[in-house]
Each structure stands twice: as C-alpha cells, then as structure tokens.
Amino acid sequence: MAEEGQGTSPLGAGVYPKAQVLNRLIAKFVDVIIVAAAGRLVLPVGWLAGLGYILIADGFSGGRSVGKRLIGLQTVIPHTHEVAGFKESIIRNLPLALAYLLFPVPYVGWALAAALVVFEGLLVIGNEQGVRLGDEIARTQVLDAGQLDIRD
C-alpha cells in the first residue's frame, strides 16, 4: 500500500522509481543480439525463434530476460507485488513483436518498425515510472531487481 503523502502510479500501486534508462537500453541490446543470433544460428526457423524470444523473454526466472538478468533489472506487476510471468511478457512485448514482424518489409516496414521502437523508447524516457505502451497494457513496470518486495 502507498504510504500517506505518496502518490499512486497509473498502475494503481505506490509510485516506484523507474529503472535507469541506460540500464534498460543495455539490457534490450543484449536481448536484440540474442534475437539476431537466433535468426542466423537456428536455420530455417530462426526468425520464428527470435519472435518467440521477443514475446516470452521477460517471463523467464523472476521476470527477467537474459539482458535484464545480466544488468540487474526485473519486470514486475506493482499492484500485486509479483514478478511478471509469460502472460505479462507476451502482452507487454506485443508492440516490439509487431515491429519485428514489420521489419522484413522493405522501406515501409522499416519505417513503421523504427517508428514503433522510437515511440516505445520515448515513453520509457519521458514517463515518470519508465512505463512504455506494452507496460501500460500488461500493467507491468521494469525496476531494479530487489526493489519491490515480491510475494513468494
């Protein structure tokens, strides 16, 4: 519960400070490397493996993709004090998956994919809690690991 004097976030829980934008960028870069490697190494279904990773990455081991685990970030559901599972991961990563699906289309797909990624990035930078569109839909937030008292 939020203490007196504390505001509430749009997610319906106490306000939690956002994770550092640079840390989120580095974690996402690591995840993009994994997606690109899957596309090259897991032929002929590598592209689908990359799409699958984008969607479910934050559902692994306590709301952490590989990049988040390396950097020390965690995807959580603030109003329930639980880590994000595969359901929340799929929902919150739908905009990024859409960008991934659009990218193979020359010119128009590239422009739309870039616009989606830039829009999501601007939301992370500009939002007080660092919540992007996918987080709003899934009601999740990325925090530094251990910042939220998680239920067992």
Image: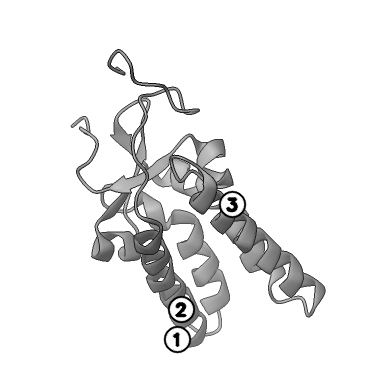
**Picture coordinates of residue 66 (x, y %)?**
32, 65
Find disc 2 in the rendering and name its residue.
Answer: 38
Q: Which amino acid does label 3 sit on?
A: Leu
Q: Is residue 144 visible?
A: yes
Q: Where is residue 139 in the image (x, y as percent from the top left)?
A: 48, 34
Residue 147 left/right relative to 50: left
Instruction: Please say whether residue 91 is visible from this viewpoint.
Output: no
Total tally of numbered discs in the picture: 3
Camera-near label (3 vs 1) is 3
For the residues marked 3 and 1, what is the alpha-carbon distance in whole angstroms?
24 Å
Q: Nearer the viewer, mark 2 or mark 3?
A: 3
Q: Is mark 3 on a helix, strand or loop?
A: helix
Nearer-the-camera pick, 147 or 54: 147
Quarter of the image that includes the C terminus: top left
* Residue 131 vertical position relative to residue 104 in the rendered view, above or below: above
Q: Are circles 3 and 1 on residues that touch, CB within 8 Å?
A: no
- Quickly name the residue at label 1: 41
Answer few, some or many: residues within 10 Å of disc 2's Cα (few below 14, many 20 plus, some between 14 and 19): some
The one nearer the camera, 132 or 62, is 132
Q: Residue at x 56, y 37 (%)?
A: 137
Question: Pointer 1 and pointer 2: residues touching (CB < 8 Å)?
Answer: yes
Query: Residue 57 is drawn in which quadrant?
Result: bottom left
Q: Is mark 2 on a helix, strand or loop?
A: helix
* Image quadrant containing the N terminus: top left
Residue 94, numbered circle: 3
Q: Distance between the residues labelled 2 and 3?
A: 19 Å
- Which image quarter: residue 4? top left
